[in-house]
Image (spheres, grey):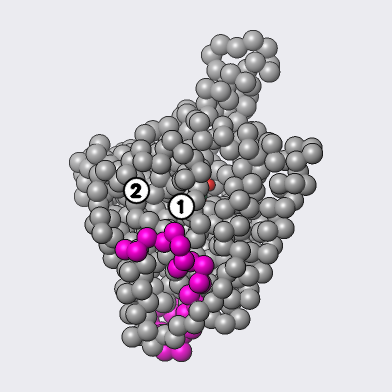
Amino acid sequence: QDYLARIDALNPTLNAFITVDHAKTLAEAQAADAARAAGNAGLLTGAPIAHKDIFCAEGWKTSCGSKMLDNFISPYDSTVVEKTRAAGLVTLGRLNMDEFAMGSSNENSFYGAVKNPWDLQAVPGGSSGGSAAAVAAGLAPVATGTDTGGSIRQPAAFCGITGIKPTYGIVSRYGMIAYASSLDQGGPLAHTAEDCALLLNVMAGFDERDATSLQHDKEDYARDLNQPLAGLRVGLPREYFAEGLAADVAGAIDAAIGELKKLGAAVVEISLPNTKLAIPSYYVIAPAEASSNLSRFDGVRYGHRAAQYEGLNGMYEQTRAEGFGTEVKRRILTGSYVLSHGYYDAYYLQAQKIRRIIANDFQAAFAQCDVIAGPVAPNTAWNLGEKNADPVAMYLEDIYTLGVNLAGLPGMSVPVGFGNNGRPVGMQLIGNYFAEARMLNVAHQYQ
Ligand code: GLN
């Protein structure tokens, strides 16, 4: 009830939630109370959570930030929602996001931009901007998000909270509306690494309904939180601290790395030589997959359908013209282009080859270090509207996060201070496959 009251008071300003339903939330809370009274309470029974509006949840509108799904009430639960329900977590509502998770500022939502709680002139980051803003403003203690190219880490950084994108295949994508399936991964956002670990324990696990789910033994991601950092080798990629990184962001991260050294870590310089190629590679592969995934929104089965049209093709065209926003259309056009006959080899295939090279670079780096540390983004949060007119300027802000998704690695964002404008700075930790517990340990020791 405290959280619902806080949402009612602050959400009209922040716009972090798309849907709030007191009756539904209170019914879940009563069920949690009943479970507790019956002696069936688990660790997180009754703990409130809010979900990014990309995770299908039975009986809840699941819009994915799009007009296309503004009328879509999901008839089923995604695996992530099913797992959080089974753990007794209580749903506070559904969080705003960039339309179909395409964006870095949460300005591409059909429901309007989200404001950064630290500074109402600033973007909260994206695409999980509602998740990060809600946690930062105390509208929810934890939230779910998804990260295709940085969408958990970057909004966590911009809003001064913690978020982790797990190894690809750890968290089921079943019922998580697809953007770029080979890159998409769900994960938690919270104030601390410890809370992220507890929520990841609930979210993770093999799921036969997701063809890319990994048959990985169940882990306790909180098990190493209190381990000392003595002997830890932290790799600093030369290319992440080069031209383009704002001096105030670099300063905050240097100070955090100094703290890790005090805790016993050793620092080694490493190289990720193809960092710059992550942007062209990602912005070919992600739109290519999106153009295929979004073909299902055709006005036939569910979602928006144009009221007036001529013929079947006219229905498709009118529906998609009305239902999708500008950035989504741009991605569909880019994706269809790079997949088309005559361009496939020149763009899509090249991008896939670069993807492999980037993954190999990370493996070479992990021969020299246990975790990689660097910035999440080159700058702190920019002003609302500042980069809207220039999509490429927005894409360039993703330089440090995209490689992790291309390689399928786990990455996280840890708040480490503030820039000159008073806006939060996040440090990124990148681990090798299945290194989540170690990364959370490093973040927890720092925090
Ligand atoms: N900013 C990137 C994009 O627009 C990443 C988004 C994401 O991780 N979902 O595609």
- The foreground one among 278 and 323 is 278
118 to the left or right of 18: left
| Three-letter code for the amino acid on which mark 2 is drawn | Trp
Residue 334 image position (x, y, % from top left): 63, 38
Question: What percent of the width, then of the height, locates residue 244?
Answer: 44, 59
Q: Mark 1 and mark 2: span between their CA atoms?
A: 10 Å
How many callouts does the rendering have?
2
Residue 120 visible in the displayed image: yes
Badge 2 element: loop
Amino acid at pointer 1: Glu
Looking at the rendered structure, the secondary structure element under dot 1 is loop
**Residue at the location (43% across, 32% down)?**
110
Relative to 401, 249 lies left or right = left
Sequence-wise first label, 1 or 2: 2
Residue 379 in the image: state x and y as whole percent: 38, 56
**Residue at image coords 50%, 72%:** 238
Does residue 180 sit above or below 371 in this rendering?
above
Residue at image point 75% right, 41% down: 343
Magenta-highlighted residues = 220-248
What residue is at 51 percent from the left and 35 percent from the top? 327
Q: Are marks 1 and 2 in contact (CB under 8 Å)?
A: yes
Where residue 382 is drawn, which disc sits there? Answer: 2
Residue 93 placement: quadrant = top left
| Residue at image mark 1 | 397
- Is residue 84 something that shows in the picture? no
Percent across and percent down for residue 382 are: 34, 48
Q: Is residue 388 above or below residue 318?
A: below
Q: Is mark 1 within 8 Å of ligand 1?
A: yes
